[in-house]
Image (spheres, rainbow, N blue to C red):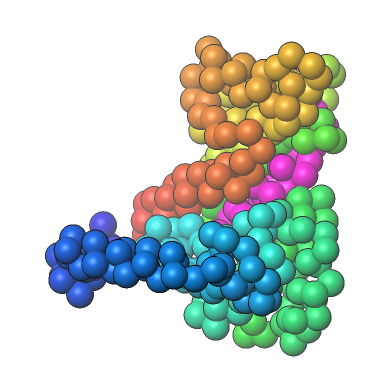
C-alpha cells in the first residue's frame, strides 16, 4: 500500500476508536427517545416546502464523499434517477468545490436544463445515450493513467448501459475503445474488431449484452484479459429485463468472466478501470 492509503486507514482507525466519532448507546437511546416524544407532540411534520407529510424529514442533508477517489481509486458518482433536481445540484456543487468535478449518472430528463443553467460557468459534458453528465471546474484537468479498456455491446439497444460504463472508465483516467453491435446473431462482425482491440494491448474488456447474454462468454473464451459481463434489461417474456442475460453470464464456462448486476454500467466501468489502472501502474514500474 502507498503512504496515502496507509494514512487513510490510520485516520479511519483513530476516528472509529474515538468517542467523538459517535455517541454511546445510552446517548443514542436518549436522543431517540427525545425525537420520538417530539414527533408524538406534533400534529404533523413540515417539509421544506411547508406541506405536511407524516414521516418526512424537514431537511435532507447530503454527504458527498469527495475523498473516495483518493482513498478507493473510484470517484464519487451522483445517481440522479431517484433524486430531486435540487439535491443533484447541491451534491454537484459540493463535489465541484472539493474535487473540481461532478459525475452524474441516470440524469432525469427534467433535471437537464436546470443543471445546465446552474452550472453555466463550468464545462459540461453530456452523454445523451446513457443520460450521464460530467461537470468540470474551468481549471480541472482529467488524469491519464495509461490504462486501456474495451467496451463492447452486443446490440444497439445495449449502447446506453455500455456508454455509462465507458464514461466512468474515462473519468478514472483510462483510454476507452468502443465496439458496438457485434452480437452473436452475426458473430462474424466481432472477429476483426476484437482482434484489433487485443492487438492494441487492452487491459480489460466490458461486454454489455441483453437477450440471452451470450456474447460475454464468447469474448471471455477468446480474450487473454479479464472480461466483465454487463447484462442489460433487454429481452422478451420469460427471463426478460436482463434476468436471462444475468443467469447466462453467471453460468458461463469461459474462464476469466466476472459479472456485475443488470444495467450496472457504473459498476462495470469502475471494476474494469481499477484493473486497467493497476496493470498500467505495473507496466510503468516495469519499464523504469
Q: Is residue 187 visible?
A: no
Instruction: Name the image quarter holding the C terminus.
Output: bottom left
User: Is residue 107 depicted above or below 270 in this figure?
Assistant: below
Nearer to the camera, 4 or 52: 52
Quadrant location of residue 36? bottom left
Q: Is residue 122 visible?
A: yes
Quadrant location of residue 131? bottom right
Give me the residue at 80% from left, 75% from top: 114
Image location (x, y in percent) of residue 187: 79, 19
Image location (x, y in percent) of residue 198: 63, 35
Give yes or no for residue 34 being in the magenta stretch: no
Image location (x, y in percent) of residue 210: 73, 26
User: Is residue 123 depicted above or below 256 in this figure?
Assistant: below
Instruction: Name the image quarter holding the N terminus.
Output: bottom left
User: Is residue 258 depicted above or below 175 in this figure?
Assistant: above
Provide the residue span drawn in magenta: 159-184
Give me the residue at 30% from left, 64% from top: 33
Along the horizontal axis of the image, is 30 left or right of 110? left
Count of number-bearing discs: 0
Give me the residue at 77% from left, 44% from top: 160
Quadrant location of residue 223? top right
Give yes or no for residue 170 being in the magenta stretch: yes
Give me the residue at 42% from left, 50% from top: 278
Nearer to the camera, 97 or 83: 83
Amino acid at each position: 500500500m502507498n503512504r496515502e492509503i496507509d494514512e487513510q486507514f490510520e485516520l479511519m482507525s483513530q476516528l472509529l476508536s474515538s468517542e467523538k466519532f459517535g455517541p454511546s448507546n445510552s446517548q443514542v437511546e436518549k436522543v431517540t427517545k427525545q425525537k420520538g416524544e417530539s414527533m408524538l407532540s406534533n400534529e404533523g411534520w413540515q417539509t421544506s416546502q411547508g406541506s405536511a407529510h407524516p414521516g418526512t424529514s424537514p431537511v435532507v442533508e447530503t454527504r458527498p464523499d469527495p475523498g473516495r477517489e483518493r482513498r478507493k481509486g473510484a470517484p464519487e458518482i451522483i445517481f440522479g434517477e431517484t433524486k430531486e433536481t435540487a439535491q443533484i445540484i447541491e451534491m454537484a456543487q459540493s463535489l465541484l468545490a472539493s474535487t473540481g468535478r461532478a459525475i452524474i449518472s441516470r440524469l432525469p430528463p427534467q433535471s437537464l436544463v436546470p443543471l445546465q443553467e446552474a452550472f453555466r460557468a463550468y464545462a459540461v459534458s453530456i452523454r445523451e445515450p446513457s443520460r450521464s453528465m460530467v461537470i468540470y471546474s474551468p481549471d480541472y484537468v482529467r488524469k491519464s493513467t495509461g490504462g486501456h479498456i474495451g467496451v463492447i455491446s452486443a446490440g444497439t439497444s445495449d449502447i446506453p448501459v455500455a456508454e455509462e460504463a465507458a464514461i466512468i472508465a474515462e473519468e478514472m483516467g483510462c483510454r476507452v475503445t468502443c465496439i458496438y453491435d457485434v452480437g452473436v446473431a452475426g458473430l462474424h462482425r466481432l472477429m476483426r474488431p476484437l482482434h484489433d482491440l487485443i492487438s492494441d494491448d487492452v487491459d480489460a474488456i466490458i461486454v454489455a449484452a441483453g437477450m440471452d447474454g451470450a456474447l460475454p462468454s464468447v469474448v471471455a473464451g477468446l480474450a487473454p484479459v479479464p472480461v466483465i459481463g454487463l447484462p442489460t434489461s433487454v429481452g422478451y417474456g420469460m427471463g426478460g429485463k436482463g434476468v436471462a442475460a444475468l443467469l447466462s453470464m453467471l453460468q458461463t464456462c469461459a474462464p476469466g468472466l466476472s459479472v456485475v448486476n443488470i444495467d450496472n454500467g457504473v459498476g462495470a466501468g469502475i471494476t474494469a478501470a481499477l484493473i486497467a489502472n493497476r496493470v498500467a501502474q505495473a507496466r510503468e514500474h516495469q519499464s523504469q
